[in-house]
Image (cartoon, rainbow, N blue to C red):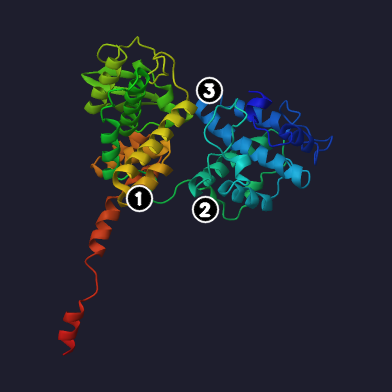
């Protein structure tokens, strides 16, 4: 990984120059780092290299590290010298506020683009509380490693008194998902026949969309897991189909494939002119580019899903107008990870036991999976509705 790969964005001034200049602030000749690094960027690159065997994790960690480095560069440019070593506790509050509202938006926020594109931006929008907590968790781990590496002398995250609240990535019930009626409408919309003048490309995109959304809903994969899926990840064992996946931390798991996923996969393969279900020697991409051969990357897959949500929102608004304003707003806000939340929530609502739901989600802790259990909320709401106000007529009769 190079400097440009870590900081591809031009802030209007040289972010790399600012960060490298600030590296000299607060460091003394007595400093003896235990890594080969001459700048903060070098040190962060060295940390990221520890995750080279887990590309998805490395990408997620790089995103948070570069946001911090770019923010430090911007702070250094506009105020006074700042580097990783000199980051103070009070500045962490400012950084967390920045994550919640990256301003000016034109400089920091933009649609998903390739990192080589000059219009690439580190944010697609303000981060939710859960995403901010996750960012702080990752950066705390980065600082812990840099302390051990001798690059910085302290970890400012350890000074946060409410660290447990801030850094606990678990939260209440999952709310970023599509409710069942909206999902049913979306799936029906995805399966609607195209107009007679549709081009071969439009037919391909429609079939691929259907495969992507069905795959996401039935097996609850993460975005990177979908993009990396191969045909021979689907295997037959004792008459049942299973999906092999390498998830977070490169941990391998095997997930049962329901009948609807088999039918969806067969339909997608038939469109690609492939026979039946995959064979063990088909080491080819499941989701493909327009040529029907090349794999689809994470960024491209993200754009496909987001564009689909936006198109669906426009179609629903045109069909139902203000009567569907709430659902249209949900579709406009939805991101690819909403599909995973939707899948797990609907599986829980269908009565799948918590232990199996946790295996499908590949969560290390059951309390993480329990966030998808809305059944108790429904029962609580139903019972609470038994408690109400007496009618005025009944009250008057008793008083008279």
Pick the quarter of the image with the C terminus. bottom left
Look at the numbered disc 3 and give the secondary structure of its residue: loop
Residue 268 locus on image (x, y percent): 30, 20
Identify the residue under disc 1.
Answer: 325
CB under 8 Å between callouts 1 and 3? no
Q: From where the camera sits, is residue 149 visible?
A: yes
Task: Name the foreground residue: 327 vs 386.
Answer: 327
- At 44% from the left and 50% from the top, the residue drawn is 171
Label 1 to label 3, Cα distance in Å? 44 Å
Residue farthest to the top? 281
Residue 247 locus on image (x, y percent): 43, 28
- In the rendered view, would you say 54 is above or below 177? above
- In the rendered view, would you say 20 is above or below 97? above
Identify the residue under disc 2.
Answer: 165
Crowdedness of circle 2 by 10 Å Cα count: few (<14), some, many (20+)? Answer: few
- At 44% from the left and 18% from the top, the residue drawn is 295
Q: From where the camera sits, is residue 363 visible?
A: no
Crowdedness of circle 3 by 10 Å Cα count: few (<14), some, many (20+)? Answer: few
Position of residue 81 in the picture relative to residue 250 (left or right): right
């Amino acid at each position: 990984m190079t400097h440009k790969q870590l900081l591809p964005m031009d802030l209007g001034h040289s972010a790399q120059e600012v960060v490298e200049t600030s590296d000299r602030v607060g460091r003394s000749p007595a400093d003896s780092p235990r890594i080969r690094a001459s700048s903060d960027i070098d040190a962060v690159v060295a940390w990221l290299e520890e995750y080279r065997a887990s590309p998805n994790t490395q990408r997620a960690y790089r995103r948070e590290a570069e946001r911090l480095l770019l923010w430090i560069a911007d702070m250094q440019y506009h105020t006074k010298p700042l580097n990783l070593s000199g980051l103070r506790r009070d500045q962490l509050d400012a950084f967390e506020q920045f994550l919640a509202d990256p301003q000016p938006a034109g400089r920091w926020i933009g649609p998903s683009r390739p990192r080589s594109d000059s219009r690439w931006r580190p944010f697609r929008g303000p981060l939710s509380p859960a995403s901010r907590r996750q960012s702080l968790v990752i950066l705390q781990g980065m600082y812990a490693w840099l302390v051990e590496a001798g690059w910085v002398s302290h970890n400012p995250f350890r000074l946060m008194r409410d660290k447990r609240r801030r850094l606990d990535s678990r939260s209440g019930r999952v709310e970023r998902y599509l409710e069942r009626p909206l999902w049913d409408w979306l799936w029906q919309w995805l399966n609607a026949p195209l107009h007679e003048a549709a081009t071969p490309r439009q037919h391909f995109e429609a079939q691929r969309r259907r495969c992507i959304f069905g795959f996401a809903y039935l097996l609850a994969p993460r975005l990177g897991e979908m993009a990396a899926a191969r045909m021979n990840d689907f295997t037959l064992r004792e008459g049942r189909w299973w999906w092999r996946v390498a998830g977070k931390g490169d941990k391998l798991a095997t997930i049962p494939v329901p009948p609807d996923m088999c039918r969806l996969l067969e339909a997608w393969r038939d469109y690609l002119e492939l026979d039946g279900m995959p064979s063990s020697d088909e080491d080819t991409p499941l989701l493909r580019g327009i040529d029907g051969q090349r794999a689809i990357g994470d960024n491209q897959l993200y754009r496909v899903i987001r564009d689909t949500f936006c198109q669906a929102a426009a179609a629903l608004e045109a069909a139902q107008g203000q009567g569907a304003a709430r659902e249209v707003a949900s579709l406009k806000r939805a991101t690819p990870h909403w599909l995973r939340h939707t899948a797990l929530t609907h599986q829980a609502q269908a009565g799948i036991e918590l232990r199996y739901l946790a295996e499908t989600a590949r969560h290390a802790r059951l309390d993480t999976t329990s966030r998808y259990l809305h059944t108790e909320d429904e029962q609580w709401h139903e019972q609470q509705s038994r408690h109400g106000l007496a009618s005025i007529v009944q009250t008057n009769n008793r008083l008279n």
